[in-house]
């Protein structure tokens, strides 16, 4: 693997910056097409900034009076490490948690990934950067189709209010099992003199973008519940 040269030439600088811009555009286009806030411009700027930071590091390595074995004395490698830490804050801002669902993880990981790709190009490791870019594009475009077909475990919370004499927990369990769900009683409490309230955790497997949910209310009412309320946890 080629070492980072001490002296930078403008043709080499232009090649590194051009590849970083190309990487930012290709990865950013995917995020923008998906309607993400951190889209084309954000991804391009992050990748370009990482490349420029590494180019600056490269330029500082060749300071007058320093030899190639004195890198540790210069300690300029803190600059790209600081870039990676800074991108971590940007990625954290892209992650949102709403209604029990966590969103933005892929966008945050993408920003961190293009930072590393930009560092590779800025350091002159063109082959490594191109290989990483190709793999990243494959993950974002091809793995999305695979992921959309993967069945994942979904969680929901079901609350039912019932009269002790008319409610059958076994009927509710059998009904939910027939829908492919596992039902677990989490907590119960008295609600008035004759009424009880019980909270259940329901788990089932479904594709991530599936709109179908188990018949929570129908199953609860068939088991003798007076009221039922449910919400998706994941």
Image (spheres, rainbow, N blue to C red):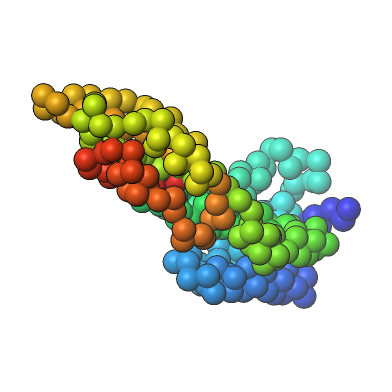
Give 75 or 97, whichever is nearer the viewer. 97
Pinpoint residue 44: horizontal percent, then vertical percent: 57, 69
Give 150 or 218, whichever is nearer the viewer. 218
Give 12 or 154, whichever is nearer the viewer. 154
Q: Residue furthest front?
A: 166
Q: Residue furthest right?
A: 1
Q: How many marks?
A: 0
Residue at the location (24% across, 26% down)?
Answer: 164
For residue 42, above or below residue 99: below
Picture quarter containing residue 73? Answer: top right
Pinpoint residue 43: horizontal percent, then vertical percent: 55, 66
Instruction: Using residue 88 as the reference point, say whether residue 221 is left or right of it.
Output: left
For residue 122, above or below residue 41: above
Picture quarter containing residue 7? Answer: bottom right
Residue at the location (75% across, 73% down)?
Answer: 15
For residue 159, above or below residue 149: above
Task: For residue 152, say whether it is visible.
Answer: yes
Give 103 or 218, whichever is nearer the viewer. 218
Pinpoint residue 99: horizontal percent, then vertical percent: 35, 49
Pinpoint residue 143: horizontal percent, then vertical percent: 68, 60
For residue 203, above or below residue 45: above
Task: For residue 51, say whether it is visible.
Answer: no
Q: Residue furthest left?
A: 193
Instruction: Using residue 126 as the reference point, say whether residue 108 is left or right of it.
Output: left
Instruction: Using residue 150 as the reference point, say whether residue 41 is left or right of it.
Output: left
Residue at the location (74% across, 48% down)?
Answer: 65
């Amino acid at each position: 693997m080629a070492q980072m040269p001490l002296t930078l030439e403008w043709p080499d600088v232009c090649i590194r910056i051009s590849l970083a811009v190309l990487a930012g555009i290709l990865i950013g286009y995917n995020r923008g097409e998906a309607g993400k806030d951190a889209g084309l411009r954000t991804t391009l700027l992050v990748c370009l900034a990482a490349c420029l930071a590494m180019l600056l590091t490269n330029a500082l390595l060749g300071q007058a009076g320093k030899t190639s074995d004195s890198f540790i004395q210069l300690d300029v490698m803190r600059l790209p490490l600081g870039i990676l830490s800074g991108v971590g804050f940007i990625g954290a801002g892209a992650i949102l948690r709403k209604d029990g669902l966590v969103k933005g993880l892929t966008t945050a990981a993408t920003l961190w990934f293009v930072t590393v790709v930009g560092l590779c190009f800025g350091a002159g490791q063109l082959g490594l950067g191109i290989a990483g870019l190709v793999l990243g594009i494959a993950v974002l475009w091809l793995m999305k189709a695979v992921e959309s077909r993967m069945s994942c475990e979904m969680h929901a919370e079901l609350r039912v209010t019932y009269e002790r004499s008319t409610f059958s927990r076994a009927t509710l369990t059998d009904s939910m099992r027939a829908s492919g769900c596992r039902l677990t009683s989490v907590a119960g409490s008295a609600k008035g003199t004759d009424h009880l309230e019980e909270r259940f955790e329901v788990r089932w497997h479904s594709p991530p973008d599936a709109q179908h949910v188990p018949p929570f209310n129908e199953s609860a009412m068939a088991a003798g519940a007076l009221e039922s309320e449910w919400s998706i946890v994941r």
